[in-house]
Image (spheres, grey):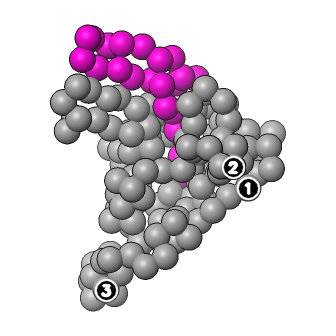
Amino acid sequence: MDIWEKLYLQAKEEYNPNEVSPFIYAHHVVSAVEMEDGRIYTGFCIESACGVMDLCAERVAILKAYMETGETTIKRLIAFRDVPPKEGEDNIPCGACREFLMQLNEKNKETEILIDYEKRKTLKLKELLPIWWREKRYKNNKTV
């Protein structure tokens, strides 16, 4: 079993679309991330009628890792709905998730994002954010 199959199978366990209440829908997008130390964390999206409380599956998985370990470097990421990612479909992190990854740790520009499960095709975050608006801040900050 390769790492992408492992990430896929662990994320798939989170897939269980359901209405939490008449205002909140969850578990219809799932994700798994492999952290720098090799540990894997999963997450699911949760969307509300309010919008401001929404969280994508990717950010939930990353926040779980951070809360447990303090780790901020993500090696690999997979996100999908009911079927594995396939190139050309809606399976890459949204703008908010991309921005969160970059703000969390500048090393995350090297995060591999699976865009096609069968072909094992990936993109790096830096390919999705080629000119990041805050690169200079990392260069000027000696604490990160």
Identified at 57% across, 58% down, the residue is: 75
What amino acid is labelled 3 in the image? Lys
**Mark nearer the viewer, 1 or 2:** 2
**Principal secondary structure, stretch drawn in magenta:** strand
> Dot 3 surroundings within 10 Å: few (below 14), some, or many (20 or more)?
few
- Say if mark 1 contacts mark 3, CB within 8 Å: no
Distance (Cα) linking label 1 and label 2:
8 Å
- Count of numbered marks: 3
Q: Can residue 4 be seen in this view?
A: no
Residue hosting label 1: 121
In this view of the protein, which residue sits in the foreground, 10 or 93? Answer: 93
- Residue at 50% x, 57% y is 74
State whether residue 83 is above or below residue 71: above
Give, as a three-letter code, the residue at label 1. Answer: Lys
Q: Do the residues labelled 1 and 2 touch (CB within 8 Å)?
A: yes
Residue 28: where, in percent of width, then height?
A: 48, 25
> In the picture, which quadrant includes the C terminus?
bottom left
The answer to whether residue 68 is left or right of residue 118 is: left
